[in-house]
Amino acid sequence: MVKVRFSSALQGVTKTTLKEVPVEGTLHDLFAHLKKEFGAEFENRLFEAGKLRRFVNVFVNGEDVRHLQGLETPVKAGDEVSILPAVSGG
Amino acid sequence: MSRVLGLVCRECKAEVPPGMVNTCTRCFGPLEVHYDWEKVQESISREKIARGPHSIWRYEDLLPVESAEKVDLGAGFKKLHRARNLGRALGLRELYVLDDSVNPTYSFKDRVTSVAVTKALEFGAEAVGCASTGNLASAVAAHAAKAGLPAYIFIPESIELGKIVQMLSYGPRIIPVHGNYDDANRLASEVADAHPTWAFVNINIRPYYTEGSKTLAFEVAEQLDWQAPDHVVVPMASGALLCAIARGFQQLEQVGLTPENHTRISGAQPSGCAPIARAVQTRGDVVPLRTYETIVHSLAIGNPADGPYARDAILHSRGGAAIPTDEEVLEAIHLLARTEGIFTEPAGGTTVAGLQHLVENGTIEPDERVVLYATGNGLKTQESLTRTIHIPASIRPTVGAFEAMVSSPPPANTPQKTRGTAW
Ligand SMILES: Cc1ncc(COP(=O)(O)O)c(C=O)c1O
Ligand SMILES: [Zn+2]
């Protein structure tokens, strides 16, 4: 299971802040799973033209995926994925 | 009736009711305060400001608060010094320094925090918090103490001891985090999300918080008899300060307190961590940094939240960006102290060194009226400076020993290699 933590800004669509997802592969696969579960609205909020929106940060085990392999970053059982808005700090 | 209508998304312009939120649920973009400009206009005047308190609260009509009672330690209303000596050294005819190093906790962060903690009380928050590169921590801890709220402060583990000693004296919970500022900020964001009744000043109430820095534009204009300067130079970490100063000058013009202004805005970041300044110089995107290293801890943010907006504000105003080295920053701290009697921290040194670059490369012209923001105090960062100063050996208490000592020139603080104009 991959543990996914959703920002409260996603509450409206996910209705939960935490979800265990049975997936083994890449972030692409994880998001495919989540899109199927939460629908078009989930995709719209986070993606624009197939790419993560500028103000969406995704972390795998605390590491910003922009510094890893983006949506090609591998995820496996036990990993923690966090989806957060990039609008804080400073 | 309130002059604050609510919040609005800076990206998709969606309107959001006032509250402890910083994110547009539609597009994840950042929110900003939405004013009722007619109400602001009706209420504000130069005379009213002149009669106001000697703090940021003299500009209350342009700040997003409702309550009469402020959490006010006296942030703001700091002196704009005419810097003739530094101006001469750099080849500038009319240079000023806004000395913000002498705020209640010794940085500009008291301005944003006074607004944010006042707002936290309005929202009925049960605690306040922040992720800090060092200065915000003390500002939040001090204002929380004054407001009687608990404070949770997330910091990267490597910041200056002086700042840690100071922040702990106000009695907050501090949480030093393995890693850099961006790690501490991510953790703080997750904690803020899990505790919706806590007001994290630069996270869930960030739209209100950043408004406090507009007062740095207001004070400069007021002290120049309600004229905006030609050019300002601003240190950047997240870029929020620079954006707020740009917004401040624009709003002064909008409400008619200053004539139409064309203030050019330039930014500075240290070479070890300069994602915004590099984006300005290359006219490219802001590329977040995973790792970075600089003595300028207060400006060390690898993924700056306001980076793209700060870059755009600079480029639209026809300003520039400078990227001095740590060595140049240290020299510049001494230069400001020696010429103007103002002892600033490395963020201020970055700005002085940045100004020097911008004059040398022609971005700033010699006859522009220029304002430099010194945003933090050198006493907080002594350990960064000890390797650049020379403490003389003590002498026997005799006049002879004194005469012998002063018959040779004092050892220089820093290598006296100057760039451009000699001083
Ligand atoms: C002294 C000082 N100056 C400037 C800044 C930059 O502020 P911003 O993150 O809004 O760009 C900071 C940030 O912590 C600071 O401590
Ligand atoms: Zn939006």
Image (tube, rainbow, N blue to C red):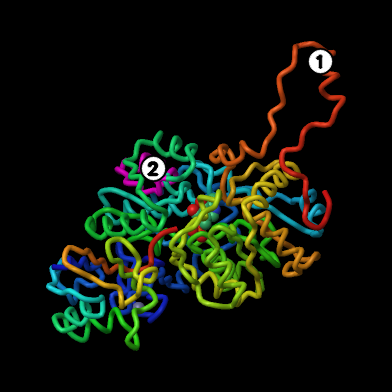
Would residue B417 be counted in the magenta stretch?
no
- Mark 2 lies on residue: B141
Q: Give the vertical position of B21 relative to B155 (above or below).
A: below
Numbered marks: total: 2
Quarter-of-image position of residue B412 = top right
Farthest residue in the right direction?
B407
Q: Any atom of ligand 1 within 8 Å of the CB at mark 1?
A: no
Magenta part of the chain:
B138-157
Viewer-nearest of discs 2 and 1: 1
For marks 2 and 1, the one nearer the N-term is 2
Would residue B151 be counted in the magenta stretch?
yes
- Across and down, in percent, residue B308 comes to 49, 73
Left or right: B400, with B22 as reference point: right
Q: Residue at x 70, y 46 (%)?
A: B336
Query: Are both tags, 2 and 1, on one chain?
Result: yes
Q: Is residue B56 visible?
A: no
Q: Give the vertical position of B413 relative to B178 (above or below).
A: above
Q: Residue at x 17, y 74 (%)?
A: A24
Q: In the structure shown, which secondary structural element does the residue marked by tag 2 occupy?
A: helix
- Across and down, in percent, residue B351 comes to 64, 56
User: A19 and B234: which one is in front?
Assistant: A19
Q: In the structure shown, which secondary structural element does the residue marked by tag 1 occupy?
A: helix
Quadrant position of the N terminus of chain B in the picture: bottom left
Q: Chain of mark 1?
A: B
The label on residue B401 is 1
Give the amino acid at mark 2: Ala
Left or right: B343, with B396 as reference point: left
The label on residue B3 is none
- Across and down, in percent, residue B329 comes to 64, 51
Give the amino acid at mark 1: Ala
